[in-house]
Image (cartoon, rainbow, N blue to C red):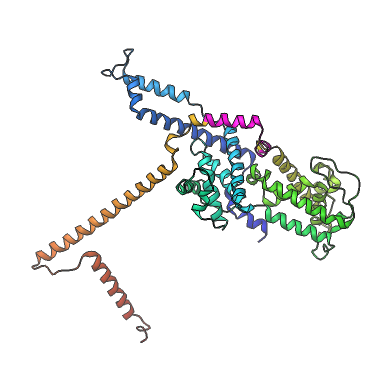
Amino acid sequence: MTEDDIYRASTQYRLWSYTPESLASLRHSTNAVASQRVRAAIKRARESQPSSATALGHNGGVGPDGGSGGDQRKAAAAKVEMDIQCLTVEEELKLVGYYCVKCMGLSDFCSFPSNVKATAVQYLKRFYLSNSPMTYHPKSIMPCALFLATKTENHYTPLKAFAGKVPKTTPEDVIAPEFVITQGLRFTFDVRHPFRALEGGFMELVAIADDKARALGLDDEAFRDLPRRTSAQGSSESAKAPPPRDLHGRIRAAHAAAKGILKTSAQLSDAYFMYTPSQIWLAALYMVDEPLARAYLDCKLPGSSASSSGGAPNRASTDDVEKPSSPSSSPSARAPQEFSSLKIRLISTIHHLTTTLLSSQGVAESLNPTAEYIAELKRIDKKLYTCRNPERMDLVEWNQSLRHRGKDKGDEEEAEEEEEEGEDDDDDKAGNASFGKETGKPPTKERNKKTNRDRGASTNADDIFGGPLK
């Protein structure tokens, strides 16, 4: 089984991988369903208020204008439903992105490692694929998602200590939405990050710089004519790379810059939903040092040089790839063509991914908020205040009501079982009385326990291998 097969068996690939079209469709459907439920919840809340019933007019069932009170209530409810302006998909994305940044800041304040921070951000993004901020405010969900990530990533953190670091938050506030979050995550807590892939690639690049590529089965010929370092936005220089002794510094600088991209833009964009961890780290390396990334791909996939294709991957010689190979061609002759085809597709995917990381909606604004961006967030939050689901505002109270409801249901089931046992005991007593004096049999529950012990003893006695050794 290859690593690709292992990743395809993961829940991240099976449940949380989308195309751009399916991802947008899912968000629009979630927003539409949440808008309907919010309007219905606000309508129920306003109808249950006594003041609203008085305002609608109940003078013997006739309103002030001579109409019936029921008709006026329906008209007022319809007007209320029309007056509610729900959030759009774009406004929801901006709000969730802002609280993802706040989650990263809280993680840094608590000195959590990178995997905990990244997992918490992905929990938030996954949760709001099937839930709306109009139903669950991100301010209430964000601390619980971060605390849940400390548990799933095996980073022990006491609940009271964590709640003490969040202003105006009690331990009950932190854990109240935990079950709701786990439901939104479909009870799948595994998140595959690109950090380990980056470290593996960094180790291979260091080995190439140390002239150990041959021992690893790598072709280091591409590194002999390596251009100077450029980013994905700039153009490659024609000058050669510095001497080999400076290659280590270049690799370390690219590693640090790529890791910064993986901690920020990769987390706040939709890269995790549309690409694999290996593609994400290669795109990060491509963004910070394009010639180094192309030389690394030439080293891993020997054949036609990736660096010779320039900025666009389609410039590579595709004639040889599209031309069918003759049956007499040897495997060694077909291997370069296969590598060339794979390299072209891989670089094309990396180009699309770098575009996603650079131009994803709200990433740059979330990382470096401007005054206009903050004003827009305040407007969205003010709008959210008027279109929140009133039944899910206090998650602590709502969670307690669910617990009491479950406890009451359990008490009712237990009472029904005791009642059925009591009826069985009454039947036993009636049967004994009909045959004379009561024999004083034990209750049904105790009699069942005794019967089970006798059955176990008889089983040992009938054992073909004999009873237990003494």
Quarter of the figure that contains the N terminus: bottom right
Q: Which of 110 and 368 is in front in this view?
A: 110
- Report whether 70 appears left or right of 191: left
The percent position of residue 343, horizontal first and vertical second, equals: 78, 50
The percent position of residue 237, horizontal first and vertical second, equals: 88, 44
In the displayed structure, would residue 50 be above or below residue 317? Answer: above
The percent position of residue 402, horizontal first and vertical second, equals: 39, 46
364 in the magenta segment: yes
In the displayed structure, would residue 14 be above or below residue 441? Answer: above
- Report whether 84 appears left or right of 446: right
- Report whether 131 appears left or right of 376: left
Furthest-top residue in view?
A: 65
Is any atom of residue 13 visible in this view? no
Residue drawn at the location 67% of the way across and 56% of the way down: 4
Furthest-left residue in view?
A: 436
Q: Nearer the viewer, residue 462 or 166?
A: 166
Furthest-bottom residue in view?
A: 470
Residue drawn at the location 78% of the way across and 54% of the way down: 252
452 in the magenta segment: no
Q: How many marks do you count on the picture?
A: 0
The percent position of residue 458, horizontal first and vertical second, equals: 30, 77
Extent of the magenta region: 363-383
Is any atom of residue 353 visible in this view? yes
Give residue 93's quadrant in the image.
top right
Q: Nearer the viewer, residue 321 or 74?
A: 74
Quarter of the figure that contains the C terminus: bottom left
| Predominant SS of the magenta segment | helix
